[in-house]
């Protein structure tokens, strides 16, 4: 029995390493026999989706940073500037996400086609530094066909972003003396010049823990800063009291009487942002600022670019529109990016609008 087993079973050396003749080891052959090709649909869908989502989110984060550092735009900047910048940011993010996700699909597709993926990782690769950085989509925007496709992608990205609840102005950094990027009226309470009641403070605390601070978006799950009685969120008057007093003192507001009085609401604000707001307004009042509402913007604004939101999933949705259910040749032909599908979407929308009109 011992002699029989020794002739039939491989040695430990043969099991874990290749033979001197260059033949694959038993372990390598076992892995090669595994049907990695069955994972191809998963990788072709998952990798581009992740790449597209992260690229979209990163592009919007870059926009927030540039608005903070260079443009000095915040949520207190007079409208429609934040909204217009936000629309441009979403359009650019959609286009960048589209290109990167198709490139990710191309890399995965080439890996499987050349037999280089997972189980065959040590064979000659078809991915080189030369083709890794080539564009999978013709982006010469001086060509009318390329420009038309880019515009379609941007429009679809904007529509998807809006459909997921995104607001263009909220991409701008949060002003500490104005509605923050995370503020939503549905998650606020009516307010007057008085302080919040015990019941209102309790409700604001629950809202803050559920949806976060309207300025920075934090839910203070691991936060250490606490206010009186251990609360993590303050019922923040929006606009702040000193801002409302200044606005209501203007002649055109007085002329309109009760119709010109600024209305306030309570929004949840974390203790950290509340303390910052108090310091900014105190300095602005001492300096006799003529516009207290914008004093929390500019260099004083809160940079929230690293906080992910559900509307950032627009990048993944754009990947699904581009790739899912499409053949490889449809994705790469005519300049790349599944142009036929986007053009078909445009034609269908135009036809439906024509029927309605």
Image (cartoon, rainbow, N blue to C red):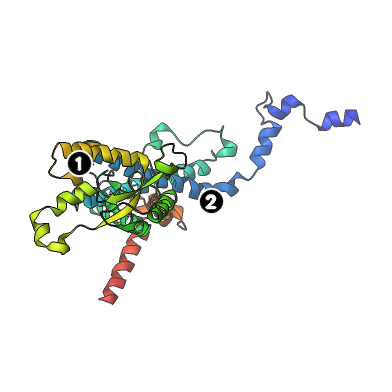
Front residue of 297/288: it is: 288
The residue sitting at 45% across, 57% down in the picture is 326
Q: Which residue is mark 2?
A: 41
**Local crowd size for mark 1, using a 10 Å CA cut-off: few (<14), some (14–19), many (≥20):** many
**Residue 228 in which image quadrant:** top left
On the question of residue 324 being in view, the answer is: yes
Spatial CA distance of label 2 from label 1 is 53 Å
Q: Which residue is mark 1?
A: 295
Q: Position of residue 166 (x, y in %)?
A: 34, 54
Up-down relation of residue 203 to residue 8 (above or below)? below
Up-down relation of residue 186 to residue 63 (above or below)? below
Secondary element under disc 1, as helix, strand or loop, is loop
Secondary element under disc 2, as helix, strand or loop, is helix
Q: Position of residue 167 (x, y in %)?
A: 31, 54
The residue sitting at 9% across, 58% down in the picture is 252
Front residue of 153/138: it is: 153
Q: Position of residue 322 (x, y in %)?
A: 40, 55
């Amino acid at each position: 029995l011992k002699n029989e087993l020794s002739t039939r079973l491989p040695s430990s050396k043969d099991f874990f390493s290749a033979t001197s003749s260059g033949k694959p080891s038993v372990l390598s052959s076992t892995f090669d026999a595994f049907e990695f090709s069955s994972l191809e649909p998963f990788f072709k869908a998952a990798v581009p989706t992740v790449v597209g989502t992260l690229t979209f989110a990163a592009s919007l984060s870059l926009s927030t940073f540039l608005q903070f550092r260079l443009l000095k735009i915040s949520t207190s900047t007079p409208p429609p500037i934040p909204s217009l910048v936000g629309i441009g940011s979403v359009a650019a993010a959609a286009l960048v996400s589209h290109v990167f996700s198709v490139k990710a699909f191309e890399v995965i597709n080439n890996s499987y086609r050349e037999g280089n993926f997972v189980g065959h990782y040590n064979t000659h690769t078809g991915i080189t530094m030369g083709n890794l950085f080539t564009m999978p989509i013709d982006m010469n925007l001086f060509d009318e066909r390329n420009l038309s496709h880019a515009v379609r992608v941007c429009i679809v990205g904007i529509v998807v972003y809006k459909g997921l609840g995104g607001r263009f102005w909220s991409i701008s950094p949060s002003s500490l003396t104005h509605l923050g990027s995370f503020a939503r009226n549905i998650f606020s309470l009516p307010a007057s010049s008085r302080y919040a009641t015990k019941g209102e403070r309790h409700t604001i605390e629950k809202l803050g823990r559920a949806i976060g601070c309207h300025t920075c978006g934090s839910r203070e799950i691991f936060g250490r800063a606490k206010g009186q009685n251990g609360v993590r969120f303050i019922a923040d008057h929006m606009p702040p009291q000193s801002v409302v007093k200044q606005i209501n003192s203007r002649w055109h507001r007085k002329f309109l009487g009760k119709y010109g009085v600024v209305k306030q609401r309570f929004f949840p604000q974390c203790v950290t942002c509340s303390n910052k707001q108090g310091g900014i307004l105190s300095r602005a009042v001492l300096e006799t600022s003529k516009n207290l509402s914008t004093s929390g913007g500019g260099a004083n604004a809160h940079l929230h670019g690293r906080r992910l939101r559900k509307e950032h999933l627009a990048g993944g949705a754009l990947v699904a529109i581009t790739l899912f259910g499409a053949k490889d040749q449809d994705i790469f032909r005519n300049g790349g990016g599944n142009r036929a599908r986007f053009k078909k979407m445009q034609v269908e929308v135009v036809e439906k609008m024509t029927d309605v009109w």
